[in-house]
Amino acid sequence: VCEYAGEILDFREACRRVQLQSPSDSNYIIAIREHLCDGQIMETFVDPTYTGNVGRFLNHSCEPNLIMVPVRVDSMVPKLALFADRDICAEEELSYDYSGRHHNYLPDLQRDQEKLQGGELKKKICYCGAKSCTGFLPYDGSLFYEEDTTGRTKETL
């Protein structure tokens, strides 16, 4: 459908930008984590705030019709491609799951979502209206810490 295009950031710069935002600011920075066969996690951070395209305006849904897939063409840095996950009707809003949970189980994000529901983190209400709506936008706390607190090896592009 389109690419989620923008400026490629390293981990520290992504953290810096996220931490400078106020709760009312829009956050377009996305973190893609790819789990490699040797146990490492390769991360790509994309910020389309200044150099992006239409992809940054796609909304979240707990039952999206798009899925984001990292695609590599002649580079280790992936393009973040948004593909249709099912047939999409004319004039239907395009959306994807900001957390990447759609078709995946991600325990770290599940734990963060449980903290949201318990009131431990600042909540941003989800307005997607899906039957399976979690009630809050996905929250990924990893960019609020300078170090990897999970004990996993990270490789940042």
Image (cartoon, rainbow, N blue to C red):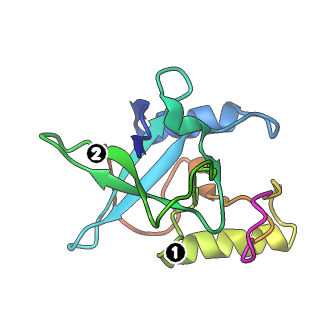
What is the quadrant of residue 121 in the picture? bottom right
Q: 87 or 135: which is nearer to us?
A: 87
Q: Secondary structure at mark 2?
A: loop
**Alpha-carbon neighbours of circle 1 within 10 Å: few (<14), some, or many (≥20)?**
few
Q: 152 or 76: which is nearer to us?
A: 76
Q: Quadrant of the C terminus?
A: top left
Task: Choose mark 1 or mark 2, whichever is in front.
Answer: 2
Precedes in sequence: disc 1 or disc 2: 2
- Residue 146 location (% of width, % of height): 54, 47
Q: Which residue is mark 1?
A: 106
- Tell me the residue at 51%/46% (across/down): 30
Q: Is residue 76 left or right of residue 51?
A: left
Return the mark for residue 12.
none
Q: Which residues are magenta?
A: 127-133
Q: Is residue 2 left or right of residue 138?
A: left
Residue sticking out furthest to the left? 74
Magenta span main SS: loop
Residue sticking out furthest to the right? 119
Q: CA distance from mark 1 to mark 2?
A: 21 Å
Q: How many tags in the picture?
A: 2
- Tell me the residue at 87%/67% (across/down): 119
Return the mark for residue 78.
2
**Alpha-carbon neighbours of circle 2 within 10 Å: few (<14), some, or many (≥20)?**
some
- Residue 134 location (% of width, % of height): 75, 72
Q: 128 or 49: which is nearer to us?
A: 128
- Residue 22 location (% of width, % of height): 78, 34
Q: Is residue 13 left or right of residue 10?
A: right
The amino acid type found where label 2 is placed reads: Pro
Q: Is residue 150 magenta?
A: no
Q: Is residue 130 magenta?
A: yes
- Residue 77 location (% of width, % of height): 26, 42
The amino acid type found where label 1 is placed reads: Leu
